[in-house]
Image (cartoon, grey):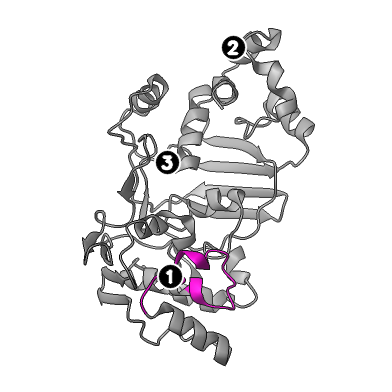
Amino acid sequence: MALLVACINALAAEPAKVVRFAYPSGEQTFDPQRWSDQVTASLTENINEQLLTYEYLARPAKLMPLTAESLPEVRDGGATYVFRVKPGIYFTPDPVFKGRLRELTARDYEYSIRRLYDPKVRSPWQFLVEGKIAGGDEALAQARASGRYDYDAAITGLEVLDRYTLRIRLKAPDYTFIYAMATPATGAVAREVVEAYGDENADVGAHPVGTGPFILKEWRRRSRIVLEANPQFRGQYLESTKATDARERQIIAGIGGRRLPLIDRVEIDIVEEDQPRWLAFLNRQHDIMISLPWVFRDVVTPRSSWHHGLSGRGTDHALHRVQHG
């Protein structure tokens, strides 16, 4: 969602359907259960979707459904959560599916959560579920002992009740657990995709197949990433019940209820050095400045002679980022 809104801001400055920017550090993988850096997270959440997300403009933070029909039904004083997946959401086409439409189901989320436990995945996000889901730790212990995680063995706290319904039962009430379902680490992957492209050697991380607004079109490791709009994406609409800030109201007014994403292509270069990244932005090679280097802070402050020139070039979104932290 953050990438979608960043792209919207860029469109205010340039009406093109392509948005270009640079990241100051390289990506690791496009496997939602394996990532451990901010760069990868911002990309995977636009490819593989989780059940919940955050209402972008709400302050304080507020959860909202993403692929779920609604926020989960909470039972047993916060020890049981029942999620219902929206019908009619499909993974992007892939040869693994043999020409068939592959619908997102509750089973995909059960499988993706199980991957957090699998020792061979070595997920840095295992802490989200370890010690929490009933039966999960026992399955993990068995996998460590046998050297193989059994994805078909029953886990007491992970139950697929029907095609679209997933029930998660915890060992003890925990009202914070719901937030784990809004992290990119719980993004849905299809089991047949993981098995086809190789889970153990992490090839699946170079071949993401998801249901989100973008697909991975090009990837040169730690050099260049290109995302293209998913032509079959169902669409999203930016909404907020608490857009009281003037800039937030401006964002919503500018979108005008249009279907997201508004762009066709996102081109990302990995530029680790501060000065080349800054110069590329000044030379209009990039449309957005991510994390303006501290050394250039005085250049864009209102008292700087550069400030008015930059504002006149439609780079106000970058200036706002600096001035308001």
Q: Is residue 129 magenta?
A: yes
Quadrant (top left/top right/bottom left/bottom right) for the N terminus: top left
Query: Mark 2 is on which residue type?
Result: Gly
Quadrant (top left/top right/bottom left/bottom right) for the C terminus: top right
**Front residue of 28 and 124:** 124
Q: Is residue 95 magenta?
A: no
* Residue at disc 1, secondary structure: helix
Left or right of 49: which side holds 316? right
Query: Mark 1 is on which residue type?
Result: Ile
41 versus 192 height, above or below: above
Q: Earlier in the sequence, mark 1 or mark 3?
A: 1
Where is residue 50 shown, x and y percent of the image? 40, 58
What residue is drawn where x is 74% and y is 41%?
271
Q: Taken as a whole, is the magenta stretch helix, strand or loop?
A: loop
Dot 1 and dot 3 residues touching (CB under 8 Å): no
Number of numbered discs on residues: 3
Dot 2 and dot 1 residues touching (CB under 8 Å): no
Determine which residue is flagged by label 1. Answer: 113
175 versus 195 height, above or below: above
Determine which residue is flagged by label 3. Answer: 261
Residue 54 is labelled as none
Q: Which residues are magenta?
A: 115-134
246 versus 252 height, above or below: above
Where is residue 118 shown, x and y percent of the image? 52, 77
Closest to the camera, between mark 1 and mark 3, is 1
Where is residue 142 shown, x and y percent of the image? 50, 88
Query: Mark 3 is on which residue type?
Result: Pro
Closest to the camera, between mark 2 and mark 1, is 1
Q: Earlier in the sequence, mark 2 or mark 1?
A: 1
